[in-house]
Amino acid sequence: MPPIPFPFPISVGTDICKISRIHKILSGPRAVRFIRLILTDEERKTPRPYMTAVMSQYWDKISDPVVAERVKAKALKDSAHFLAGRFAAKEAAIKAHPHRNLTFHKIIIKGETALLDYPGGLPRDPHHIENGDSSAPSDSVPQQVPTKTDELKGDTVLDKEALYAEAERKNHPLFISISSPPVCIIKGDYETGVEDQVAMISISHDTDYATATCLGWYHGGGKGDLTSPLRRASEREWTVEREATQRNLREQGRLIRTETERRRGERGERVNRLMSPFGTRKVVQYLDEGHRERLERERLQREQEQDEDQRREETEEERLARDREKEINQEWNRELGPRSIAQERRRKQIWGEAPRLEEGKDTKQEDDFYQSEELWEEFRKLMKPDSENSESSEKKGHQ
């Protein structure tokens, strides 16, 4: 026979956390990020020792460095103890509720006194009150009642009669205690109809470790069919809203396309519509006055560019002519052979003495200069190779 299953819908979860590990995280640059990961928004509103972890940089402003270091060390120690306990408690709560997909932000660790303002909970036998009756008259309520600050502190010992009287006045369940130990509040899920529930939690610290044990229970998978109509209604509302949004987007797109086509028509840049799906034949091309003006401007610009190209081509021809003349001079120089500096200077001097007449005037003087026999004789001597000049000079020397 199979073993008899556990008869109660409860489960236990436990976890352990090393305090020095949390202390190292709080001492680093990721302290604020770690606190936001572990604690919910509601828990961070409660004045707790973890606040000293994110304010530890202000302890350095104390004038005495020894006192500042001591205060900072104590603040980080208290913060590490507190957050290590909360980390272990939430891990234990996740293990104690395997049927729920829980995260750190779906679990709230608070004192039991915080349940005075919390809707719902588990009622306790009203006869648990010592030396009192739950139906006490309202005029017998003491003046001392728990304030919001007392509820947030969690560990404050409040007046017993005042607590129960306040709970009775607000018609809250008497799920409270005097020492206000921590309790675990599991947030519900609206989609599945699961309500918020309370689980028992126990946190303990010993040397460098913090341990926690959670006792969870299973109270069903939600309201079932009661939430199905709500879910279908919400889905229907969401579908209607989505369709309306899509219609608005389509209408906006149509207006944008119409405005774009109108502007293109004004500029004379209407897009050519294609008759075939492959875009092989143009059907119509619309040209208005503005388009014609633009074409005329483009034509004038092309003509100007052609003129500039032509001027650049003429300049190129001149450059080629100069290069050709330079090549001819170099070839002529190679044929004549090397000359002395004095011969080259004299050649330039001869050509420099030639008269240069203005265009349109008598050129007889210039012609007479170039037809002079003495000039040509000297020029021929200069144009002879250096070897011949040296031989002639040697013959003259021997003579």
Image: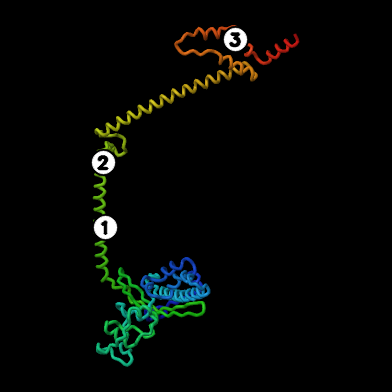
Label pair 1/2, CB-CB below 8 angstroms = no
Residue at horizontal 64 percent and vertical 11 percent from the top: 381
* Residue identifier under label 3: 375
User: What amino acid is labelled 2 in the image?
Assistant: Arg
Label pair 3/1, CB-CB below 8 angstroms = no
Q: Residues within 10 Å of mark 3 (few under 14, many from 20)?
A: few
* Residue identifier under label 1: 242
Q: Looking at the figure, which quarter contains the C terminus?
A: top right
- Give the spatial CA distance, label 3 vs label 1: 107 Å
Percent x, y for residue 61? 48, 70
> Position of 172 compared to 385: left or right?
left
Labelled disc at residue 263: 2
- Give the spatial CA distance, label 1 vs label 2: 32 Å
Residue at horizontal 26 percent and vertical 41 percent from the top: 263
Q: Nearer the viewer, mark 3 or mark 1?
A: 3
Q: Secondary structure at mark 2?
A: helix
User: What amino acid is labelled 1 in the image?
Assistant: Arg
Residue at horizontal 25 percent and vertical 38 percent from the top: 266
> Residue at the bottom extreme?
131
Does residue 178 appear in the picture of this structure? yes
Percent x, y for residue 345? 61, 18
> Residue at the right extreme?
398
Q: Secondary structure at mark 1?
A: helix
Label pair 3/2, CB-CB below 8 angstroms = no
Q: Nearer the viewer, mark 3 or mark 2?
A: 3
Could you tell which of marks 3 and 2 lies nearer the N-terminus?
Answer: 2
Above or below: residue 393 compared with residue 35: above
Above or below: residue 325 compared with residue 16: above
> Position of 233 compared to 24: left or right?
left
Residue at horizontal 51 percent and vertical 21 percent from the top: 322
Percent x, y for residue 350? 58, 14
How many numbered marks appear? 3
